[in-house]
Amino acid sequence: MIKNYPPEIRKALRIITLTQCTGQLTNILFGNGFMLAYFMRQGVPDYRILFLFAMMPLIAMLLTVPFSLIADYAGKRFVGAAGIIISSAGIFLLFFTPFFPSAAESGLAAGTVIFSLGATATGSSWFALLSPIVPAEIRGRWFGFMRMTFQFTGVIFSLAVAALLRRFTSLSFFQTVLFFCGGMMIFRIFLYRQIPELEPCTRLKFNFPAALRDVVRIPGYMSFCAYMFLLAFCTGAVPNLLGLLQREFLGFTDSMLVVLGNLLIAGTIAGFFVGGKLVDRIGPRPVFLTAHIVFSATIALILFRGFFPLPTAGTIGLAAFFFGAMQGATGIAGTSELLALIPPENKSFTTGMNITLSSAGLALSGVLSGQLLQNHMLHTHWQFYGQPMSAYDTILAVLMFLVALMAVTLGLVPAVRHLRAQWLPQNR
């Protein structure tokens, strides 16, 4: 794919891939159930875990655009490297929390917030930094290859952690994994600094009202952002609720929790590949329509887990895989639609607005779910045709119906034709 390009371009693309592989080792801990188990081991209640995990998209919602503006002025690589340093500080703070049990919850909250601040800073300038490096004619294919590479690396790492959790169950093992990932974050700084910054800083005064007015006037852009907000709201809390269901209600081990989290991530990788093919052939809107069906069906599979001949873990694992696959496919469809809508000017700001609204949906989904659990508004145990159910099942059932009903909002997705499947090079 890249062998016909100059050596400096080939080197930069390899460094970018290595940078993402090292960063993914830390990011995957928040998505595969590892951090959820780590927080529970230190006595954090379920509703607070949802709040803390919701802080990550909330910070992204509030700070992506400001950080992107700072990056345009101070330098994209400078802001990105500073973000990696801040993220590593957050990981090491999470590592130290078990040494101070009385302040563990405060330490976990601070570590999560600091990590999220750094990740948002790095992610805000990531697309703008890479855009002039990656040749336009291979952008979609290369970003797809790069993203599947670092996701696959993360899955291999996560499977190794899950295998070791079956033997080493103490809290010190969780700390060992965090210390290793913190070290990889520090190593990532040196890799990141080798990525060339080809576009100089603008040093121009940014007119926010004018830029916002231009964004609002883009045909179909705001309606598409509204759709992505709603979709994120209806699906964002599902992975964490599924993890809490497994650990708190079904009594799965930490190792099993991480294994099933890996199935979700493996499904996402498959979704990248299948989603790219579907977008190229039929366009984004049919992919989104399929998403409403598959998301609802997979949540229903979780709710009806007791009525299938498979073991409960097998049924939930199957549902997690297909849910992740649909997340990957909709990510490809959403990115392709977004890049077809945005104009050449203020690209970072325009994409940042879309990320902000999607992050708002994710954060709101987690916060509201946590509020329902904190205020004991739902029955913790109930029966459905003889099958034991939980408050987590109740919330999942509500989200299942919301996703299905949201199919009527597909009119918000513009009918953009002749799209090429593309992967937004997010720093995750």
Image: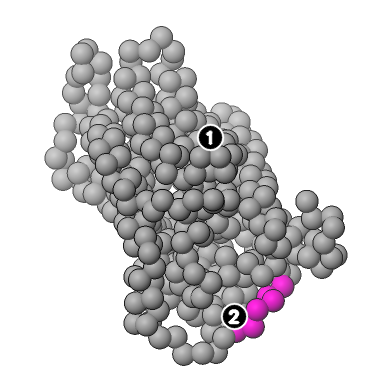
Distance CA(mark 2)–CA(mark 1): 36 Å
Give the class, few, some or many, for how many residues have Cα within 10 Å of label 1's Cα (few <14, many ≥20).
Answer: many
The location of residue 320, given as percent across then percent down, is: 45, 31
The location of residue 394, given as percent across then percent down, is: 23, 32
Residue at horizontal 73 percent and vertical 70 percent from the top: 194
> What stretch of residues is rendered in magenta?
196-201
Quadrant of residue 159 within the rendered picture: top right
**Judging from the image, what secondary structure is the residue with disc 1 in?**
helix
Amino acid of disc 2? Gly
Residue 200 covered by magenta stretch: yes
Q: Is residue 64 visible?
A: no
* Residue 3 versus residue 342 in the image, above or below: above
Q: Which mark, by number, is residue 205?
A: none
- 262 with respect to 395 (left or right): right
Q: Quadrant of the C terminus?
A: bottom right
* Residue 159 versus residue 209 in the image, above or below: above
Please tell me whether the stretch drawn in magenta is mainly helix, strand or loop: loop
The location of residue 265, given as percent across then percent down, is: 53, 39
Q: Is residue 419 visible?
A: yes
Amino acid of disc 1? Gly
* Residue 277 versus residue 23 in the image, above or below: above
Q: Are marks 2 and 1 in contact (CB under 8 Å)?
A: no
Give the residue pinned by disc 1. 267
Q: Nearer the viewer, residue 318 or 371?
A: 318
Q: Earlier in the sequence, mark 2 or mark 1?
A: 2
Residue at horizontal 64 percent and vertical 66 percent from the top: 130
* Residue 164 versus residue 76 in the image, above or below: above
Residue at horizontal 57 percent and vertical 65 percent from the top: 127
Give the class, few, some or many, for how many residues have Cα within 10 Å of label 2's Cα (few <14, many ≥20).
Answer: many
Q: Which mark, by number, is residue 75?
A: 2
Q: Outermost residue, top direction?
A: 309
The location of residue 220, given as percent across then percent down, is: 37, 60
